[in-house]
Amino acid sequence: MSGGSPGATITPRPAIADLPQIRAHHPGRIAASLAARTPGQRPAAGEQLMIIAADHPARGSLGAGPDAMAMADRTDLLGRCLEALARPGVDGFLGTADLIEDLTLLGALEGKLVFGSMNRGGLPGAVFEADDRFTGYDASGVAAAGLDGGKMLLRIAPDNAGTMHTIAACAEAVNDLAERELTAMVEPFWSYTEHGRLRNDLSPDAVIRSIAVAAGLGRTSAHTWLKLPAVPEPERVMAATTLPSLILGGEVSDDPDAALATWEATLACPNVMGLVVGRSLLYPPDGDVAAAVDAAVGLL
């Protein structure tokens, strides 16, 4: 039996090729699609999440593996996101407004948790890289779009004065999201400046220091989650906080099996709630997005 009223028409989902015309002539469809989107479900106790991330392009960071321009073709990137989001066990997406809006129009975010990327202003190699301004979503935009929370990058570089602005801005974003009962996903790194570029210290002690700073941001941590790298000594590292934490994928690895083993060890920690992975799954060395996503989901 078909549903709907007699004579009702169903608007077909657009193709990627249709997006420029929709944006040019029917921009109102973006807000309408966001408002009509079926939201995702928060995890039950004991469940872990698989989130696909694709917010690197907004920082001008387009490389994946050996290809410095891997993410430059938006049609290709959207196709990879569509393939990843369609795999069983994938719970959500993290990205900037342009990608979230495209994927919403394409119907790929139905029933998914969605997190908006907030500060993308710290462009790699820029003199202002440590002063990582909030040029993406703000808390009101996250709420208006019906998203589940906002993600912010917090690189703590004691040798760079721009860091202080970023710390203060992240604290304010945590407050603004908490006021709306939205998740603040903070991604901290203890960093240093080398030849004009920020580098992240991924030693266990450095990650623990970054966790301590990130967990203390804002006037409440009730809605704060952490997004952390998988590093050696995961039990000691994750013992640094009681906050729910998601493990990021990082750079595309030449040894995907070793990356999976590191994720698996970290996922065993009781406060780790899942994975947030982008380039490692969207641009695997063998090109098989579906198999890469399925292998990661299999760890949960």
Image: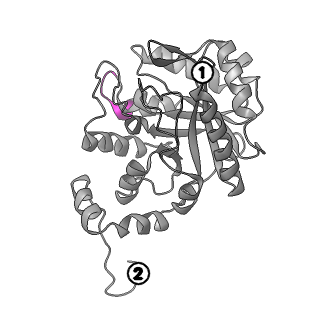
Asked whether 285 or 195 is in front, the reply is: 195
Q: Position of residue 40 (x, y in %)?
A: 56, 55
Query: Which residue is drawn at the image coordinates 31% and 33% (left, top)?
Result: 71
Q: Which residues are magenta?
A: 285-291
CA distance for labels 1 and 2: 57 Å
Circle 1 SS class: loop
Amino acid type assigned to the residue bearing label 1 in the image: Ala
Asked whether 75 or 1 is in front, the reply is: 75
Residue 124, picture quadrant: top left
Vertical placement of residue 170 versus 124, above or below: below
Q: Position of residue 110 (x, y in %)?
A: 46, 57
Residue 210, picture quadrant: top right
Asked whether 47 or 137 is in front, the reply is: 137
Q: Which mark is residue 4?
A: 2
Circle 2 SS class: loop
Asked whether 42 or 97 is in front, the reply is: 97
Few, some or many C-alpha atoms within 10 Å of disc 1 (few <14, some 14-19, many ≥20)?
many
Q: Quadrant for the N terminus, please.
A: bottom left
Few, some or many C-alpha atoms within 10 Å of disc 2 (few <14, some 14-19, many ≥20)?
few
| Residue 211 colored in magenta in the image | no
Amino acid type assigned to the residue bearing label 2 in the image: Gly
Residue 10 located left or right of residue 216: left
Q: How is the image coloured?
A: one colour
Residue 154 located left or right of residue 239: left
Q: Which mark is residue 198?
A: none
Q: Quadrant for the C terminus, please.
A: top right
Q: Position of residue 261 (x, y in %)?
A: 54, 17
Q: Can residue 171 be seen at all in this image of the molecule?
A: yes
Residue 291, picture quadrant: top left
Judged from this view, the residue extending furthest toward the bottom is: 6
